[in-house]
Image (spheres, rainbow, N blue to C red):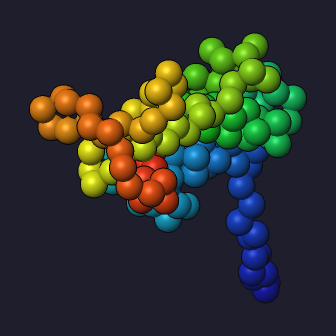
Amino acid sequence: MEKKKITKEEKESDIQQVVNHFFYSKGFTLDEIKESAKKKKIIYSRFTRPAKQLIDLAGSVKKAEEAITTVANWAKSRDLDYSIETVFKKWLELGKLKPKDIIKKPFYRNQPMVWSQTKRKWYVIDDGGEWLEYADKEDKIEWRIQK
């Protein structure tokens, strides 16, 4: 009797695709997910039931992944933590969930600046809190993202 070698293609199940997509949205690679699961840093099975429920709710793996991505972008822009369950909580708001706008604030030599609408001038706020009239060129203003 001859033994046949069965070559098994590694294909992720629908649930694995959704769970892995969740971890990808958190910044993990597939190898990091596997390594963390082996070291029991991640209890992978804890995520399978919510992933299955999300697939049922969304109707397809693709829609479930899109929902995770939407919630992930929204949560990250607000420095919030999120889980698969967060997608359920935000399900009815998915169309309205948008990432927070990035607001850039003006600085001059590491000092914050303020625009006076009435005087139509820029002011630099020094360390003592005093407002000094800005006299340099506008291209010297540094715009930084503030959280």
Q: Residue 13 in the image: x percent, y percent?
A: 74, 49
* Direction from residue 92 to residue 107 in the image, left or right: left
Question: Is residue 81 visible in the rendered structure shown here?
Answer: no
Toward the right, the furthest residue is 59
Q: Nearer the viewer, residue 107 or 14?
A: 107
Where's the N terminus, which quadrant?
bottom right
Question: Is residue 27 visible in the rendered structure shown here?
Answer: yes
* Direction from residue 10 to residue 77 in the image, left or right: left
Where's the C terminus, which quadrant?
top left
Q: Residue 127 in the image: x percent, y percent?
A: 15, 37
- The structure residue drawn at horizontal position 27% and vertical position 54%, both measured from the top left corner, is 109
- The structure residue drawn at horizontal position 27% and vertical position 45%, both measured from the top left corner, is 111
Q: Nearer the viewer, residue 80 or 98?
A: 98
Q: Residue 43 in the image: x percent, y percent?
A: 43, 40
Q: Nearer the viewer, residue 126 or 25?
A: 126
Q: Where 9 falls versus 99 (above or below)?
A: below
Q: Residue 22 in the image: x percent, y percent?
A: 60, 42
